[in-house]
Amino acid sequence: MSTSPIAREDVPAGAGAVQMAELAPDESPYFNRELSWLQFNQRVLAEASNEKYPLLERLRFLSISGSNLDEFMMIRVAGLVGQVQRGLETPSLDGRSPSQQLSAMREKLVELSAIQQAIWRSVQGGLAGADIHIADEQRVSPVAHKWLKSYFLNEILPIITPQALDPAHPFPFVQNEGMGLLFTLTRDATREQLIEMVLIPSALPRFVRVPDSVIEGSGVLYISIARLIQRYAEALFPGFTIQGDGLFRVLRDSDIEIEEEAEDLVRTFRSAIQRRRRGQVIQLELEEDFDPAAEALLRDQLGINEAAVIKTDGMIGIDGLAEIVREDRPDLKFDAYSPRLPERVREHDGDVFSAIREKDIVIHHPYESFEVVVDFIRQAAADPDVVAIKQTLYRAGSQSAVIGALIEAAEAGKSVTAVVELKARFDEEQNLKWASALERAGVQVIYGFTDWKTHAKVAMVVRREGDGFRTYCHFGTGNYHPVTAKVYTDLSFFTADPKLGRDAAKMFNFVTGYVEPHALERIHIAPIDLRAEIYSRIDIEIANAQAGKPAAIWFKCNQLTDQGVIDRLYAASNADVQVELVVRGICCLRPGIAGLSENIRVKSIIGRFLEHSRIYAFANGHTMPSAHAAVFISSADLMGRNLDRRVETLIPILNRTVHDQVLQQVVLANMLDTEQSWWLHPDGSYSRVTASKAGGIKPFNCHRYFMTNPSLSGRGGALEAGAVPKLSLRRGAA
């Protein structure tokens, strides 16, 4: 009994794939985690090639791909290099050894690097046509040259330091993500040859923008900091002739490992952050015409062993292009979008607690304003009836209004507890700073478990009302981060349900006092019982299918890598449960294999906004989608680390209107999308989803739908039900 929203025959077979075919004896039923992630980044790169997008948005996707690949090298590749060096042979889910994975990954990384450079050349040409120029010898006019030279002499020269590389001078330390230039010089007086290194300080901008006042005619002119130094290097080396120069960049192992017996977690993390900057070199990027002698010196001094060496004739440090994306050219960017304030909150004159008291509400970011979340804490801080606030903080960003609101609450005499996760990768240093600021304000700061990350997104406010107390809760699928809330699609669920409030209090006691929660009424918590609940719900669908009842599973998440969950989904497929998965990034499950997964489809959505919400829905004996489906939102992806080594929450959605919004608006729109979606094929390849004209399915863009339609649960009484277009399974569009 099929309950899928789109005819299943609309999924094309991937190139080279034999859909609905049995696995060969030597084939793995799982995809490799690392190669699946690289496939995801290739889909991001495809957006940078999308000529329907404005040029600066294409450049943004290109810079994101660079940042993604850097993190992949510093964490995933570094981890496998460490395993090889320690002689570990633990196989991956698909049966590959660490060395086999490294070999396959490096081959793919070289391919992706070449694609990046090709896209950069294309976009650079387009930008020039739009009067945004990246300086070359032909582009710099005499007036601009004069300004650039003055800028170099006055702003750059005093900061940079050349260092001779010879036995008398120790080789300088090159920090993680550090860039430098090597110059091959000849002393004019003696004809002596030597090599000098100039490290480019990270405090300097990656690109320098020439003021409009010195540009002849219209247009904008940028020059990279490396090219600026190279252009005027003669001023740095008087009395020398420059024979050649070359740019390089270093990536280092950046994973942080904390021993379980660490006595002082804060001190341990401060030390670990310092060690990260000095981790072993994992990747060395060089310009293609880099001097061989200088390259040999770098390889020797940096200890290049297992590190990848990538040579390019294009740009080094693709992530730095984000600086050019900030150029004020609205015509080269997506149309500006301002998040809506939910009508229900507006009807209550902005009083968040009054709106929640009326009934549960879910806010869909970034389409609806993150300010509602900030106001939840800010209003609690100012409310004389609020006695306590408890909040988890995983990533809060460098300019967090939520942190400010917690400080205000503590200074107003409230009892404020903040669970700050120090192990949030690459945010450890920022979180340490926030922790110190919170403690100075009188907030009780807790760091949680040493060996488990607290990844749950929960805030609770206890308010005195009448003769007792009422607990208001916020459960999120994303972080309390004001910047990412503008581009990540996430859900914020607000409720005053007493059962959820009691469960939230038990979760906080678990993290702060290691008091394992008992008799939970609504919430499921990892690593205690979240995995068991997911398994149980899948098993119910299997039993329903075997009993001839409607059976379906709809998941939306970022990653699916856990073998136990995958095997359970395979069992569901074999029981004729129809499984629809929207997995943005890594997916180790192989769909479309007869006898294994023929009833499973997987798609990935990549577009203007980053899909980030985690939603798990089960038909529960009724045709999907229905009011009887069991629907949950979660902070957890379906990965071993989330289910077994993190504190996560799985929240049931029981309110009818919120249930409809999450299932029949958010999840269904993702499934119906034809403009930003990619099908995953049995061979691991992806292809773009296309609308089927023959099937009468119209093109549909889920991001556009959410930008132009109010949410169901936040619409308030001012909007009639007909004001929100209902999504249809048959029509496939709003």
Image (cartoon, grey):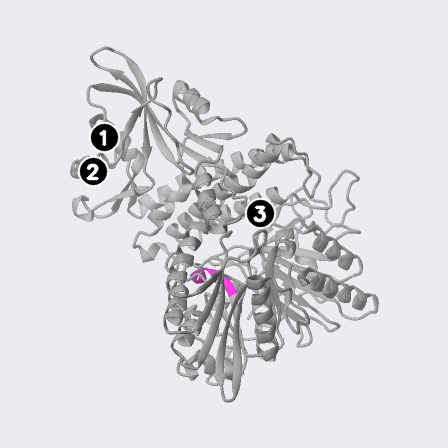
Relative depth, front residue between 249 and 201 = 201
Q: Earlier in the sequence, mark 2 or mark 3?
A: 2
User: Magenta residues, as a range?
Assistant: 485-490
Q: CA distance from mark 3 to mark 1?
A: 53 Å
Say whether residue 655 is left or right of residue 289: right
Report helix, strand or loop for mark 1: loop
Look at the picture and state if 74 lies above or below 595.
above
Look at the picture and state if 368 lies above or below 603.
below
Residue that mark 2 sits on: 148
Residue that mark 1 sits on: 232
Say whether residue 574 is left or right of residue 664: right
Residue at 33 percent of width and 18 percent of height: 168
Image quarter for residue 151? top left
**Are dots 1 and 2 in contact, CB under 8 Å?**
yes
Residue at the farthest right position = 547
Q: Nearer the viewer, mark 3 or mark 1?
A: 3
Q: Quadrant of the N terminus?
A: bottom right
User: How far across and down, in percent of the image, does residue 268 sit?
Assistant: 48, 46
